[in-house]
Amino acid sequence: MKSKLQVFLCIYKMDNLLSEIRNCTVCKGFLPNAPRPIIQASKSSKVVIIGQAPGRKVQNSGIPWDDASGNNFRAWLGVDKQTFYDEEIFALIPMGFCFPGTGKSGDLPPRHECAPLWHQQVLKAMTEVKLTILIGQYAQSYYLGNDCKSTLTETVKNYKEYSSKIPPITSSIRLGIIFGK
């Protein structure tokens, strides 16, 4: 059992880490707007959702998944906004923390600096993770590496090949999450 001091130090460490991330400007020269890193996490988050990068609306609001895709995702998860935005339950970690800009056919890919710079630090600081969900091609490629199939659909279809803690999904798959099982 952790002492009160150990718990305090874990919380302090996570708070400082999140503050560092939210103040990060590593890729500012490549962004269309001033950096505004978006992340939600707690040392005691139970479910980690690793997604792509915030879109323009999320970048403006500062709230992860605060757009139509977030509404759809919460509906598919079967959770309300209050539960989804409870950092003690859900950690929302994008592959790129800032809006990367718009390309010819939609948003640009997440910046490649964020995940190697910050992800492992955040994941190590969370002590109660029960499930990690990889949303989309960039998260799956980064975390599954050579085990990814040739398409996102094939990777998802073969989810049983991957660790039970890291199911690759697309945002069109309905999930049932049971805590503590």
Image (cartoon, rainbow, N blue to C red):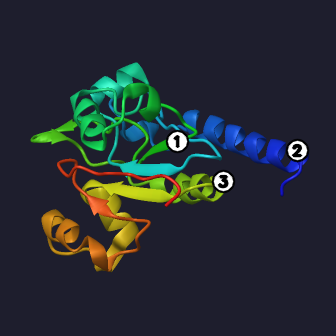
Give the left or right position of residue 101, taking residue 47 as reference: left
Looking at the image, residue 78 lies above or below residue 135: above
- First of labels 1, 2 by sequence position: 2
Q: Quadrant of residue 76?
A: top left
User: Pointer 1 and pointer 2: residues touching (CB < 8 Å)?
Assistant: no
Give the left or right position of residue 105, taking residue 179 as reference: left
Give the left or right position of residue 24, taking residue 36 as reference: right
What is the count of numbered marks? 3
Question: Regarding mark 3 in the picture, which secondary structure is present there?
Answer: helix
- First of labels 1, 3 by sequence position: 1
Q: Nearer the viewer, mark 1 or mark 3?
A: 1
Question: Regarding mark 2 in the picture, which secondary structure is present there?
Answer: helix
Disc 2 marks a residue whose amino acid type is Lys
**Residue position for label 1:** 89
Question: Regarding mark 1 in the picture, which secondary structure is present there?
Answer: loop
Assess disc 2: are there few (<14), some (14-19) or many (≥20) residues with their C-alpha within 10 Å of its C-alpha. few
Q: Quadrant of residue 133?
A: bottom left
Residue furthest left as drawn = 105
- Asked whether the viewer can see residue 35, the reply is no
**Residue position for label 2:** 4
Q: Position of residue 171 (x, y in %)?
A: 22, 48
Q: Position of residue 7 (x, y in %)?
A: 81, 46
Residue 125 tag number: 3
Disc 1 marks a residue whose amino acid type is Ile
Looking at the image, residue 63 lies above or below residue 37: above
Q: Nearer the viewer, mark 2 or mark 3?
A: 2
